[in-house]
Amino acid sequence: MAETDGVDGWRVLDGGLSAWFDSPSLSVGAAFAGRIVGLVGGRGMPDLDLRGGGVRVRIGVPGTEAGDADVELADAISAAARELGMAADSAGLQELGVAVSSTDLLPVVSFWRSAFAYEPVGSDRFGDSLRRDSGISFHRLEQPRPLRNRFHVDVSRMPDAVEEFKAAVGQESYGPWGVALADPDGNEIDLVPGSELADGPATADWRVLFGAMTFYPTTSAAQAVQLATAVARLADEAGRPLLVDLRPDGVTIDSGKDQWENDVAEFVELAARIQSAARELGLSADLGRLRFVQFGIDAVDVAAVRAFWTRVLGYHEDPRGNDIYDPRRLNPTFIFQQMDAADEARRRQRNRTHLELSIPSDQLQTRLDAAVAAGGQILPTDRPGSHAVADPEGNELNLLTA
């Protein structure tokens, strides 16, 4: 299906169909989710990401082409959205991933797959089984690049998972925060153990992995909507725009990075009410499914590099520091760290890692123009459907279109 054909507001990303519908509250989003589940019938439930300002819907399996049945479902979902007064807005649709290159892929792939606890997606990619966190692809590098990257990944998981991974790779953490690990090529990950939200059994289902979050497996789409509806009501009453992600096998509830810290006591009370609502539905949390991912870039001119990524990704700057974030809270946060300007060799070396951004084809020129306007440059590439750009200090981004 061509992206300009078919149903207004829907776009092709990674083979599947994606749409965003504005909504005034989580409760309206939960009502929309209920209607979608009623439309699905016996086929698989789409991914539903409820946010305070809207709902993202993704139909189809990554890497597979959308079919006529997908288009028909998209049409029906759009009609349901209109009945609820929810307008489609395709401008911010995107999915961000990381690509790792190596001259010896096998041990590098093994390291990253285990660090993230990801599953295979196609021949050269691995991804989150819940399709919340960014996927990883791998590419062969012809010549080694031995110096330290200017890009790294932060991942937070449960403490036992962190310790098991460190034991498996035979490394002790290092770095200023004591959480850094490196793959066989020296590509770095800060693997951060999560912590409890609060003392006592009332919030035993919650953990802090930069954000406060929990995951409840569900036995049906109807049960997932029941939980999402209860969570939405409680969150709206508390004035907390939680992230509520519905999947065929469960529901993730997330504060968003650091958002629980605005008023800890108030959030702990909300978390306890949500836990109580989940248990009234007979649900038990599975904390092993929780994960947080963000990206870090070292830069000499932090302001210029941050401005580039803010414009190209359509992100917002966090006034509390150097972070930038997706205003829809769907893609990873970025942090920027000061780099020594005297480290000329490291500045000249191309990173072994780069980012890949899947976007609808009708957004391509806008993103390329934004990259150049923000001091970046367009790079040559011979990969079909890929358009490479670099920020003012050479950190690369591939724009991928259907």
Image: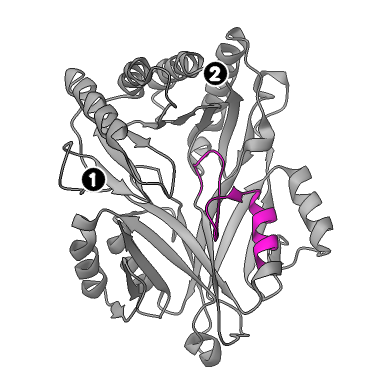
Query: Which residue range is magenta in the image?
Result: 108-133
> What's the residue type where badge 1 is placed?
Met
Q: Dot 2 lies on which element?
A: helix
Q: Dot 1 lies on which element?
A: loop
Q: Nearer the viewer, residue 103 or 64?
A: 64
Q: Residue at x 51, y 14 (%)?
A: 223
Where in the figure is residue 218, as x and y percent of width and height?
A: 57, 20
Q: Nearer the viewer, residue 334 or 85?
A: 85
Left or right side of 148 for 166: right
Check residue 274 in the rendering and tell me which mark sits there, or answer none.
Answer: 2
Where in the figure is residue 378, as x and y percent of width and height?
A: 28, 78
Q: Residue furthest top?
A: 280
Q: Residue at x 57, y 46 (%)?
A: 292
Give the CA separation, mark 2 to mark 1. Answer: 41 Å
Can residue 318 be seen in the rendering of this structure? Answer: no
Considering only vertical position in the picture, is 247 above or below 193? Answer: above
The residue that disc 1 covers is 1
Badge 1 density bin: few <14, some 14–19, many ≥20, Cα 10 Å: some
Marked residue nearer the N-terminal end (2 or 1): 1
- Determine the image quadrant of residue 229: top left
